[in-house]
């Protein structure tokens, strides 16, 4: 890949940022198709986020921004327009600048990307009992997308259960006929467990639930882009471990389209890019 004066820039904004895998997958896909675009990591803390967005609004070769922990909810206040999914869940994981209207446009592809990543690995959610841990920006989007797959039950857990109740109140009206409730961080009796918390971003983080509640044959999913204590425990007990990279794989082409980049691939391909805990 050669970067020149015509290269379109994509930034990924996060804090911390060492765990991100978007640049590697995005850049490999762009290079394979001969597209002149590059993704670079931007390590930005919450206090600096408004200044970053204000400054990048004037960057004319910026295709857009991928947004991840902990900024997905905070960026919504800086958007003049939101896609329906971003508006419903109150979080955005992609931004593009609309120069004609003079504002940021926010979208949320996390939920659809997560479900697409499951389907591409042969996993369905219809009729399953699903436990979702985490009610932040990614958790809300995943909850809405999972609910649209008609599980038998969707149970939401968050460290602050008041936050889980808020998410329930937000998404339940959009999921008629789906049993959605809040509950404990206990995998017993569930077919699918999904971690959408920040636990796992750093080496040494514990699993987000008691691992002795995991059982052989259940599907245990991560949104974190590295091998985590939860995935290790899932493999150890004979459960199916579904890495966080698959969520990114499932939304890579959609991210590019949101930025106006003509990426044709759905998946980046290649071996999973995870770090061993």
Image (cartoon, rainbow, N blue to C red):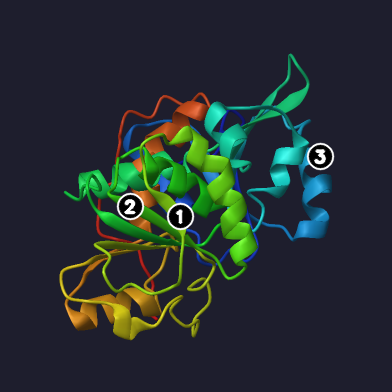
| Residue 74 to residue 276: above or below | above
* Labelled disc at residue 181: 1
- The residue that disc 3 covers is 55
Q: Position of residue 216 (x, y in %)?
A: 16, 75
Q: Is residue 214 left or right of 165 when viewed as pictured?
A: left
Q: Are marks 1 and 2 in contact (CB under 8 Å)?
A: yes
- Residue at (72% x, 48% y) in the render: 74
Report how many numbered discs are placed on residues in the image.
Answer: 3
**Sooner in the amino-acid sequence: mark 3 or mark 1:** 3
Q: Label 2's element?
A: strand
Q: Label 3, label 1: how many angstroms apart (C-alpha)?
A: 41 Å
Q: Nearer the viewer, residue 31 or 275?
A: 275
Indicate left or right for 229 with 233 as reference: right
Can residue 276 be seen here? The reply is no
Q: Pointer 3: residues within 10 angstroms few (<14), some, or many (20+)?
A: few
**Side of 47 relative to 183 (left or right):** right
Q: Nearer the viewer, residue 182 or 33?
A: 182
| The quadrant where residue 76 appears | top right
Badge 2 density bin: few <14, some 14–19, many ≥20, Cα 10 Å: some
- Is residue 18 something one can see in this rendering? yes
**Residue at left offset 62%, top offset 51%:** 166
Counting from the top left corner in percent of width and height, residue 40 is at 57, 49
Q: Give the labeled residue for mark 2.
A: 153
Q: Quadrant of the C terminus?
A: bottom left
Between the residue at mark 2 and the residue at mark 3, the CA separation in whole angstroms equals 44 Å
Which mark is drawn over residue 253?
none
Rounded to the nearest angstrom, the CA distance separating label 1 from label 2 is 8 Å
Disc 3 and disc 1 in contact, CB within 8 angstroms: no
Q: Secondary structure at mark 1?
A: strand
Tell me which residue sits at (55%, 27%) in the image.
Answer: 84
């Amino acid at each position: 890949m050669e970067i020149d004066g015509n290269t379109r820039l994509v930034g990924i904004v996060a804090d911390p940022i060492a765990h991100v895998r978007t640049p590697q997958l995005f850049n490999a896909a762009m290079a394979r198709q001969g597209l002149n675009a590059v993704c670079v990591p931007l390590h930005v803390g919450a206090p600096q986020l408004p200044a970053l967005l204000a400054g990048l609004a004037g960057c004319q070769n910026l295709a857009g921004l991928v947004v991840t922990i902990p900024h997905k909810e905070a960026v919504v206040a800086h958007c003049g327009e939101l896609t329906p999914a971003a508006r419903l869940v109150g979080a955005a994981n992609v931004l593009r600048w609309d120069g004609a209207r003079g504002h940021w446009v926010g979208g949320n592809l996390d939920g659809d990307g997560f479900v697409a990543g499951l389907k591409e690995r042969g996993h369905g959610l219809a009729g399953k009992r699903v436990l979702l841990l985490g009610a932040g920006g990614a958790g809300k989007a995943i909850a809405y997308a999972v609910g649209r797959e008609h599980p038998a039950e969707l149970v939401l857990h968050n460290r602050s259960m008041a936050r889980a109740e808020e998410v329930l109140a937000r998404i339940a009206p959009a999921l008629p006929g789906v049993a959605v409730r809040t509950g404990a961080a206990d995998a017993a009796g569930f077919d699918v467990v999904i971690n959408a918390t920040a636990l796992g971003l750093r080496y040494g983080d514990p699993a987000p639930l008691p691992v002795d509640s995991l059982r052989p044959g259940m599907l245990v999913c991560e949104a974190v882009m590295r091998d985590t204590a939860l995935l290790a425990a899932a493999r150890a007990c004979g459960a199916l471990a579904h890495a966080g990279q698959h969520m990114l794989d499932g939304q890579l082409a959609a991210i590019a389209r949101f930025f106006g980049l003509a990426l044709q691939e759905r998946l980046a391909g290649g071996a999973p890019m995870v770090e061993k805990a």
